Amino acid sequence: MAVDHYIEDEKNRVAVDVSIEGKSGEFDFNTLKTGGIIKQRQRDKFTVRLKCPGGRVPLEKLPKIVEVAKRYGGDYLHLSFRQSVEIPYVDYRDIGKIQKELGEVGQEIASCGPRVRVPTACSGCEYNPNGLMDTQVAAGRVSEKFFGSGHLAHKFKISFSGCAIDCARTNEMDLGFQGAVKPKWEQPPCTGCKLCAHACLEGAIESDPDTGQPIYDAQKCLYCGDCIRACPTESWQAETQGWMVRCSGKHGRHPVHGQVIAEFLPDEKVEEVVEAVLAWYEKNGAGKGRTRISTLLLEEDVWRDFLSEIGPALGAWAVENPPSPRPNEIHFVSPPAGLPPAESAPPPLAAAAKPPRETRVEPQPVQAGTKAEVKVDREVDFVGVACPLNYVKTKMLLDQLGSGHVLSIRLDEAGARSVPQSAGQDGHKVLSVEQQGNQWRVLIRKT
């Protein structure tokens, strides 16, 4: 393999028939990288990164992308961690042809370097049952207005998550937006069915022992909306809905945990907040070298100045006195010199606490003769019942059974993954998970 030892040499320039920020001619490798054209370790080879806001590529563009990759690249496409399609093993002499041919279907090349990167996003509320906000539309708007912009000290990453699961890792972004809904309970027409308490995975809702009506603890609420989805009488409603805004996170060698600076921000305010944060970073990062916004904001006085300056953009949705970002070191017992210490680790869980939700249940396969030996006390069909309602109903049935009794449940594939895991976390014994055609049969013994 011919390795190019001059990848970082800014004096080494190549003539490329491509336009980068309106310029053409000879470019050094770093300038090419800012245009989404990344030098590989192999001599004369580059990876071309494509612009894919929210991780979506329209079907009409795919044939041309594949055609170009086959003609000028290697034998595969690469999907980056930030949802971009990359064409590796491109000879620099062909980069101009790639840009021109992709342009025929409106496919742009992405950006790298000290500028706003392509926003990432989950599917949001378009088809995800957990989605609360339209992440794809928001990511598209932000990409259209801010992609590749700014005279910044370093890269600037933005992401959008539709719900509390936060697949887009908003706490690791320079600026992250996570969908949230604040629930509100109205007594009529509540029937005291307790479904909301069973649906709440955070313990924010408990049922009154006499009436069954919910007792709500807002301090434990993640604003996920599970109680609203589970309520059969619509007693739980959305009081307010919007974006939780996190700022100053990053991953990499020295990760930083971003902080929430606004709650339930209206969707129409997103661009105003992005613009205000970028303006602050452009001004305060000038002359600081290659410095992420998170590094600047680790200093308490700088953090307070930042919050004061962007406050008008956050408006009434600003969080009062949020703590400054904190390092989340993974390579050192204590942070290196110059970085403040991370917050103390939380005390260990009490012995009586439930197992952490990350615990995975590995059901034992059904052995020959098992079904004949296991006496099923109750059998139900939950095929098509969405999560978390499928386990809410399962939990209610298990509560009605005696210890040692067996519940047989028919589920679809998603339910067969989630219900056994939740049952195991609640201390029940998962006897088997057996596929039967397009459905699954799960046997659970109540402890």
Image (tube, rainbow, N blue to C red):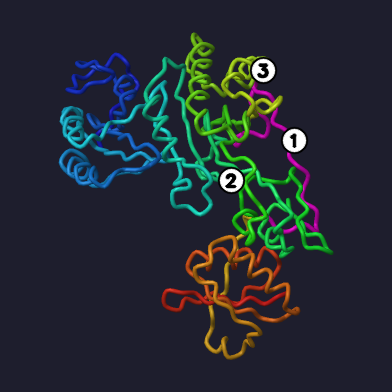
Residue visible at 62% across and 73% down? 430
Element under label 3? helix
Residue pointed to by mark 2: 164
Outermost residue, front side:
188
Q: Nearer the viewer, residue 199 or 427?
A: 199
Give the residue displayed 23% in from the left and 45% down from the top: 60
Spot occupied by residue 301 in the image (x, y as percentages of width and height): 68, 15
Residue labelled with disc 3: 304
- Relative height, residue 383 to residue 353 (above, below): below
Which is nearer the N-term, disc 1 or disc 3? 3
Q: Is residue 353 left or right of residue 51?
A: right
Numbered disc 1: secondary structure: loop
Q: CA distance from mark 1 to mark 3?
A: 22 Å
At horizontal 63% and vertical 56% (from top left) the residue drawn is 234
Find disc 1 in the rendering and name its residue.
344
Q: Residue furthest toward the right?
A: 210
Instruction: Give the mark count.
Output: 3
Between residue 262 and residue 407, name the one nearer to us. Answer: 262
**Magenta stretch?**
329-356
| 327, above or below 161, in the image | above
Residue type at mark 1: give it: Ser
Find residue 267 and name its label: none
Q: Quadrant of residue 32?
A: top left
- Indicate the quadrant containing the C terminus: top left, top right, bottom left or bottom right: bottom right
Q: Is residue 347 magenta?
A: yes
